[in-house]
Amino acid sequence: MQEEKKQMCCPWAAGSPLLQKYHDERWCRPEHRDEELFALLILEGMQAGLSWGLVLAREEAIRAAFEGLRPETAAAFDESKIEAILTKKNIIANRLKVRAVVTNARAFLQTQKEWGSFDRYIWHFTAGKVIDHRLQEGEEPPAQDELSAAVAADLKRRGFKFAGPTIIYSYLQAIGVINDHLLTCPARG
């Protein structure tokens, strides 16, 4: 049965228990909690130039280093805190990415204040609807699309970093705005 499931699931998750668990339990599932929307935005930004498997393997350490990846906490970090984070083990120790967490936390809080919640902001791009690409076996989702380009442009205008169209496409999948599970995938929900 497990072998049958692997053959029917989205190919990118097969072969890695960590990726499979993420795929089965989190990927393309609608997320509406602001704190988790922030955390996933940060994790997606950390992925730039790296593999998602590496980010998932380090997720716990990243969340701990950033004191839970809460926007209110991260927005208050100063240069000494950034330097301390860069010495932590098992994180993505890229100075630009670590600084972007602070920048993005501040932009996130401003957006949250303007819209009442970040959830309301991010889901307004699709009027609260999930975009289901209904991918067939053998079809690959795009790396970006018009939606991710529009969201990325607006985030950039708001001061967000590491939020280009490709990162934002992955983010929209991560938070369930986009459902790119194959039609044959048992994790479609």
Image (tube, rainbow, N blue to C red):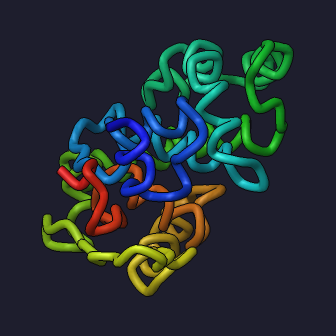
Residue 94 at x, y percent in the picture: 83, 37
* Image height of 151 relative to 88, above or below: below
* Residue 56 place in picture, x, y as percent: 59, 32
Question: How many numbered circles does the render carry?
Answer: 0
Where residue 153 sits: x, y (%)? Answer: 51, 76
* Residue in the image at 43% along x and 80% along y: 150
Q: Is residue 93 left or right of residue 127?
A: right
Q: Is 152 drawn above or below residue 73 in the view shown?
A: below
Residue 181 falls left or right of residue 80: left
Residue shown at 82% from the left, 30% from the top? 93
Q: Nearer the viewer, residue 62 or 14?
A: 14
- Is the N terminus in the top left, top right, bottom left or bottom right quadrant? top left
- Measured along the vertical axis of the image, is residue 164 above or below residue 109? below
Location of residue 48 by image quarter: bottom right
Residue at the (38%, 36%) spot, across then down: 2
Query: x and y percent of residue 20 in the render?
Result: 47, 38
